[in-house]
Image (cartoon, grey):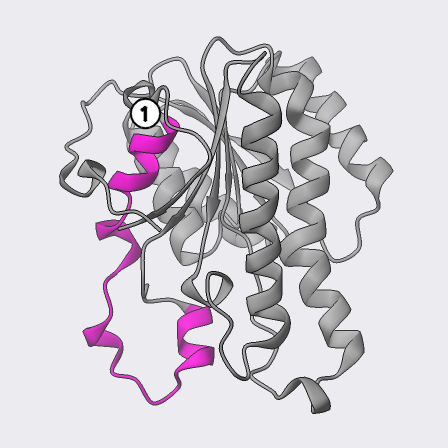
Amino acid sequence: MNRHPMNDYQPPANLLRDRIILITGASGAVGSACAKACAAHGATVVLVDRKQAVLERVYDEIVNAGHPQPMLCPMDFERMRPADFETIAGGLETELGRLDGLLHAAGILGTLTPIEHYDMELWFKVMQVNFNAPLLLTRACLPLLKKSADASIVFSADRAGRRGRAYWGAYGVSHAACENLAEILADELEANTAIRVNTLDTGPVHGRLRTLAYPGEDPNSVPRAETLTAGFLYLLGPDSRGITGQSLDR
């Protein structure tokens, strides 16, 4: 885990001009904040989530702000099979031609339960949404990312995936798996592609998932996602060229 000068990063206004960036979990706290920030810095954003009504609100906010028109791409990770991700990637290739960035910000909590008592059906659901889906989406999108001269894959990380803690169950294991996946991808892609892969843990973020995990917490004591986007912008933009295989902390 590494802190980085990106924590003081001031992104230029045109940082992501002409870039195409796919963001999962775009109706959630981190995903929606990053989508709006990327669009404000010039990116064409592909908005991915299962909640189309919320996606449409994010879409409208971006368009009404005068930023590049995003693309809506509803996906229900819980129900999608490997072939479905390939079909989606094929559609993106037809519509957009390439991807310059992929930000994995989707995730569900499951329950905070001892392993001995964890509902295994729920375990499989959490692993599907938090790990299998990012794996399958990344794999399907690699040909699109290889068409970019400067591509970046970023996983929104969590400290529960960097050190095992009691009761975090499938959520912690799924994030640990994503950390390892990111390292494998970075190692595989570094030599012969222009794709870099990193993970970023912003620390606590106010949102639905945080409220589920810490229901008694004062929400005003937790940073809003809108204040935590600079690190993601840094990793998705050209200023982070050469940085890959890193597990970064805000």
| Residue extent of the magenta highlight | 208-236
Considering the whole magenta stretch, tell me its main secondary structure: helix
Residue at point 29%, 44% (across, down): 229
Q: Within the magenta stretch, is there residue 63?
A: no
Residue at point 59%, 15% (across, down): 98
Residue 66, picture quadrant: top left
Nearer the observer, 108 or 120: 120
Residue marked by disc 1: 240
Amino acid at circle 1: Ser
Give the x, y percent position of residue 157: 45, 53
Give the x, y percent position of residue 212: 47, 79
Q: What crowding class fits label 1: few (fewer than 14 Cα within 10 Å), some (14-19), or many (20 or more)?
A: some
Residue 213, picture quadrant: bottom left
Whether residue 61 is visible to the viewer of this picture, yes or no, is no
Q: Is residue 217 above or below residue 68?
A: below
Whether residue 114 is visible to the viewer of this picture, yes or no, is yes
Q: Is residue 222 above or below residue 243?
A: below
| Left or right: 67 in relation to 49 | left
| Left or right: 5 in relation to 129 | left
